[in-house]
Amino acid sequence: MATTVITFLTLLAPIWSLQPLTPTQYHGIYQLSDPAIKADCPIWDYRNNILYFVSIYEGEIHRYDFFKQEFSSIFLDGEVAPVIPSVRDSNLLIVGLNRSVAAVEWDGVSEPSETRILTTLAPDFPTSRVNDGKADKEGNLWIGTTSYEGPNEGILYQVTCENLDSPRIEIAPVNISNGLTWNAANDKFFYIDAGSTQVVEYSYNDETGEISNRRVVFDVNDHTEQVIGSPHGMTIDEDDNLWVALYGGGAVVRVNSSNGDILNIVSFPTLGVTSATWGGPYLDMLYVTSSRISLTNEQKLGQPAPGTVFFVVGLGTKGRPAYFVDILDSIDKECEKKMHI
């Protein structure tokens, strides 16, 4: 059962001012949303200037219309992550629901008519749930799980039109399958197991969708004088620099994806930074989600607005358009032929 709720936004003044990135370049952080237990998996639909994100434990999908400055939300029966629009219909959303991949048709106003389960993951780990995912350039869904029973019971899958009945395992075992992205040349795949301190790179074959040649790009343990926390979600900018959310570290760190050097650190007024995506009409605004789970009452008092979505302006760079999922023709029809993305 899904329910639609619409709210309107009043933009706040900058809540956190930071040091310049260069002598002439400043940026500020704004609060965008009300708090959730854990906001995560932001994605920008550049076709309609819409930001989507989820509140995992509340089972909510949120939709923010940039020009109307309007929020709407739906509630699904279960834990939800991620949410990714479809190639063929911007109102057709592919979501992780508990440990399944599902489809929901929602225009941000009307009540969704149905939630369709497409496939169920991790059959050997029934207490698992989906944690994060993204589409690749071909519209295939890369989506990973985490387990409530123990470590190293997570799996990263690739889901395509052809393998809905039996999605292909790409990386296993992992602890908490999390951030993922591709470079501009589409020959490198970057991945985070949130149970580690690392961001890793794989060679990526864009014809077969296969990955190989694992290499550690960035390890928090190599930069303990600058940052703390563990890598969680991430995105990438137009120069192939990674923007990595450091959960427990209260920051998003900009990392050179070639050598692992830290280029910038954007600090937030909450420790539980979960993920980031580029958005805005020019893709030059960084939207950052956060969590208040596991914070003590004392920590909550000292951290303004944990669990909210923030946006950052004036970073001097921008992202690339997100890829969307192409595994369905419509809510009730399997895809027969890939569309050009």
Image (spheres, rainbow, N blue to C red):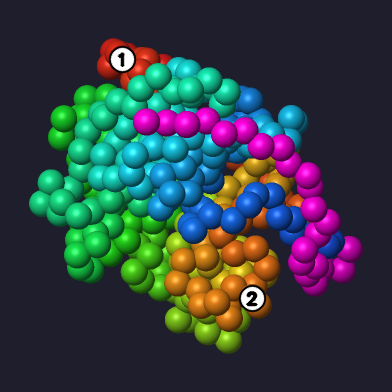
Q: Residue 9, can we see it?
A: yes
**269 or 196, which lies in front?**
269
Q: Secondary structure at mark 1?
A: loop
**Amino acid at dot 1:** Asp
Q: Secondary structure at mark 2?
A: helix
* Separation of marks 1 and 2 at Cα, in angstroms: 47 Å
Q: Residue 84 in the image: state x and y as whole percent.
A: 45, 35
The residue drawn where x is 52% and y is 65% is 292
**Badge nearest the viewer, 1 or 2:** 2
Write down the quadrant of residue 194 in the picture: bottom left
* CB atoms of marks 1 and 2 within 8 Å: no
Please say whether residue 3 is one of the residues in the magenta stretch: yes
Q: Residue 239 in the image: state x and y as whole percent.
A: 62, 50
The span picked out in magenta is: 1-24
Please say whether residue 119 is one of the residues in the magenta stretch: no
**Amino acid at dot 2:** Leu
Residue that extends furthest to the left in the rendered view of this protein: 124
Q: Tell me the tag on residue 332.
A: 1
**338 or 127, which lies in front?**
127
Q: Residue 214, can we see it?
A: no
Q: Earlier in the sequence, mark 1 or mark 2?
A: 2
The quadrant of the rendering that contains the N terminus is top left
Question: Where does label 2 land, which residue?
Answer: 301
The residue drawn where x is 57% and y is 34% is 5
The residue drawn where x is 31% and y is 15% is 332
The residue drawn where x is 52% and y is 30% is 4
